[in-house]
Image (cartoon, grey):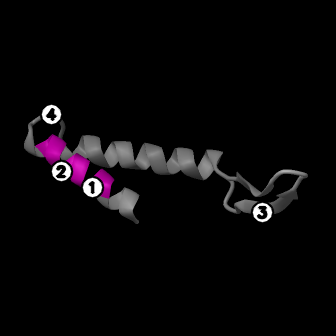
Amino acid sequence: MADDIAALYVGYTRVEADRHSWTDIAGAALVSELAAWWLVEPESKVVVMPMVGRRYVGVHIAARW
């Protein structure tokens, strides 16, 4: 959600600075949404694994998205 708000703000400032038009902003949003739909798997998996050694205790966190 915060990313969407930031992107909207950047788009607004680019239009106000006469660097882009609203159709440029809409086109970029469409391309980015299509790329995310095509390239990103919808389910993410997070693995949290405790690690214990002779001189340390820790947590290993791995994420796949």
Q: Which residue is mark 1?
A: 8
Q: Mark 1 vs mark 3: which is more N-terminal?
A: 1
Q: Mark 2 vs mark 3: which is more N-terminal?
A: 2
Q: What range of the chain is rendered magenta?
A: 6-15
In what element is the residue under mark 1? helix
Q: Quarter of the image holding residue 63?
A: bottom right
In what element is the residue under mark 2? helix
Q: Which residue is mark 2?
A: 12
Q: Nearer the viewer, residue 11 or 47?
A: 47
What is the three-letter code of the residue carrying label 4?
A: Arg
Q: Which residue is mark 3?
A: 48
Q: Quarter of the image holding residue 25?
A: top left
Does the magenta run of residues contain 14?
yes
Cα–Cα span, label 2 and label 4: 10 Å
Q: Mark 2 vs mark 4: which is more N-terminal?
A: 2
Does the magenta run of residues contain 3?
no
Residue at figure coordinates x 87%, y 57% from the top left: 52
The circle on residue 19 is: 4
What is the three-letter code of the residue carrying label 2?
A: Tyr
Q: Mark 4 vs mark 1: which is more N-terminal?
A: 1
What is the three-letter code of the residue carrying label 3?
A: Val
Quarter placement of the N terminus: bottom left
In what element is the residue under mark 3? strand
Q: Residue furthest bottom?
A: 1
Cα–Cα span, label 4 and label 1: 15 Å
Cα–Cα span, label 1 and label 2: 6 Å
Whether the residues at callouts 4 and 1 have beta carbons within 8 Å, the answer is no
Whether the residues at callouts 1 and 2 have beta carbons within 8 Å, the answer is yes
Q: Residue 24 in the image: state x and y as whole percent.
A: 27, 40
- From the image, give the main secondary structure of the stretch colored magenta: helix
Q: Residue furthest right?
A: 54
